[in-house]
Amino acid sequence: MKEKPVIIKKKADVEARFNRIRWLSVVGGFMDGVDIEFAQGLNCIIGARGTGKTTVGRR
């Protein structure tokens, strides 16, 4: 039985294959005109009920 070769890829060789939110621009409301740029890693949107967290994730 022939063994398959082991291939190891460096992080730089691996292509990112996921969607990403890069920034958020607020229009209207008390935060009108606010632009938020998200980092490449993990970002968290924290807020009370009814403040629009789910709406941001659906866009």
Image: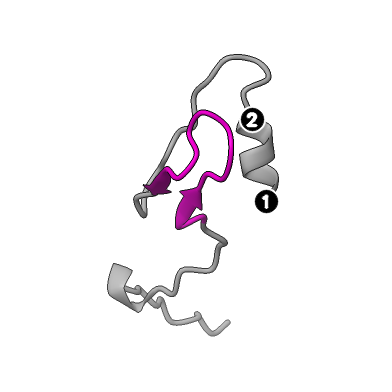
Q: Is residue 20 magenta?
A: no
* Depth check, front residue: 4 or 13: 13
Q: Are marks 2 and 1 in contact (CB under 8 Å)?
A: no
User: Judging from the image, what secondary structure is the residue with disc 2 in?
Assistant: loop
The residue positioned 42% from the left and 43% from the top of the image is: 34
* Depth check, front residue: 14 or 30: 30
The residue positioned 49% from the left and 24% from the top of the image is: 46
Highlighted magenta segment, given as a residue range: 21-37
Coloring applied to the structure = one colour
Which numbered disc flags the more N-terminal residue, 2 or 1? 2
User: Judging from the image, what secondary structure is the residue with disc 1 in?
Assistant: loop
Residue under numbered circle 1: 59
* Depth check, front residue: 9 or 42: 42
Categorize mark 1 by other alpha carbons within 10 Å: few (<14), some (14-19), many (20+): few
Q: CA distance from mark 2 to mark 1?
A: 11 Å
Q: Is residue 6 above or below residue 32?
A: below
Residue under numbered circle 2: 52
Looking at numbered disc 1 in the image, what kind of residue is underneath it?
Answer: Arg
The residue positioned 39% from the left and 78% from the top of the image is: 7
Q: Is residue 29 magenta?
A: yes
Assign the magenta stretch its main secondary structure.
Answer: loop
The residue positioned 46% from the left and 69% from the top of the image is: 16
Does 15 sit left or right of 53 as displayed? left
Categorize mark 2 by other alpha carbons within 10 Å: few (<14), some (14-19), many (20+): few
* Depth check, front residue: 33 or 6: 33
Residue 33 x/y as whole percent: 45, 45
Residue 23 x/y as whole percent: 45, 54
Looking at numbered disc 2 in the image, what kind of residue is underneath it?
Answer: Gly
